[in-house]
Each structure stands twice: as C-alpha cells, then as structure tokens.
Image: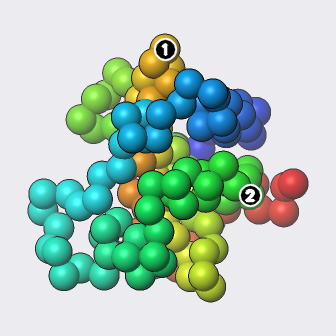
Amino acid sequence: MLFKKAEVEEFLKTLKEILTNKDFDIDKDLDILFRKKNESIDDPYITSNTLAALNYDKEDVKNELLKLKIFNYVETLVDIKDISGPRLYVFIKEIGKRDVYIKIKIREFKNKQVFCISFHFARFKNSKYPYKGVV
C-alpha cells in the first residue's frame, strides 16, 4: 500500500526527531534484526552480511536512516506479526553503488524506539518509487 506524500514525510520527520533526540540511546532504542530465523547465515542478502560488506555498525545504520528522503520511499506494509501496530515503511537507498532495501517502523512512539527489520542489499531491481523526483 502506498501512503500519501504528507504521511511519509511525517513519518520521516518523526523518525529523524527520535534519532536526534538527546535522550536517544542507540543501544536500547535502535533495534536491528540482523537475520530472520528462516534465513541462511550464508545468504548475502541478509542484514548482518550487508552490514559486514559495508563495514557498518549501528551508528552507520542510524546515519543512513537520518539521510532517508521522500524519493527513497517505496511502500508501506502491515506488520503481519503486529497487525494493529505501527506500519512498516520500505525505502531503497543507494549506498556504496548498491541499492539497499530498508524496512523500518517506529516501534514505540512514547519511548522513542525504532525497529529496523531489514537493511540489506536489494535482491531485485525496484522501479516503483512513487515520489521519485520529489525533493
């Protein structure tokens, strides 16, 4: 599902406010899913292997999240593990000359927690950017 431009911009604004808040503790407030249970450790398209290939840590992921723009937006998904919870926002961003698939949500608005479900090299070429060309 696609969200209206204003809704995606509001998400990005809130995300950036959380990540730059003086009380934000990267160790407890940024949760990264390094590998899903059904993913092979040898799969080059899992988060842990992408982070290793990019030589990235949590701080680097945070910095890339802060750089997300409306034109990186791809779609919004329902979290099948938490249907009534916050939506998952999908972005694709070029990092190191490769597209990186990023799926995130703000898990806790009150406690300012961000959950990064995916941060891995894109498996497929995406051609659908609803706000491509928008600054």
**Marks 1/2: CA–CA distance:** 28 Å
Image location of residue 5, percent across then percent down: 74, 40
Please state if 98 lies on the left or on the right of 7 as rendered.
left
> Nearest the camera: 42 or 10?
42
Decide: is 52 above or below 35: below
Check disc 2 and give the amino acid type. Answer: Phe
Q: Nearer the viewer, mark 1 or mark 2?
A: 1
Residue 44 appears in the figure: yes
Callout 1 secondary element: loop
> Nearest the camera: 76 or 49?
49
Query: Looking at the image, is mark 1 or mark 2 earlier in the sequence?
Result: 2
Query: Which residue: 24% across, 35% down?
Result: 81
> Nearest the camera: 18 or 27?
27
- The label shown at residue 71 is 2
Query: Which residue: 30% across, 52% down?
Result: 33
Q: Quadrant of the C terminus?
A: bottom right
Residue occupied by mark 1: 110
Image quadrant assignment for residue 96: bottom right
Image location of residue 133, percent across then percent down: 84, 63
Decide: is 94 above or below 118: below
Check disc 1 and give the amino acid type. Answer: Lys
Decide: is 37 above or below 22: below
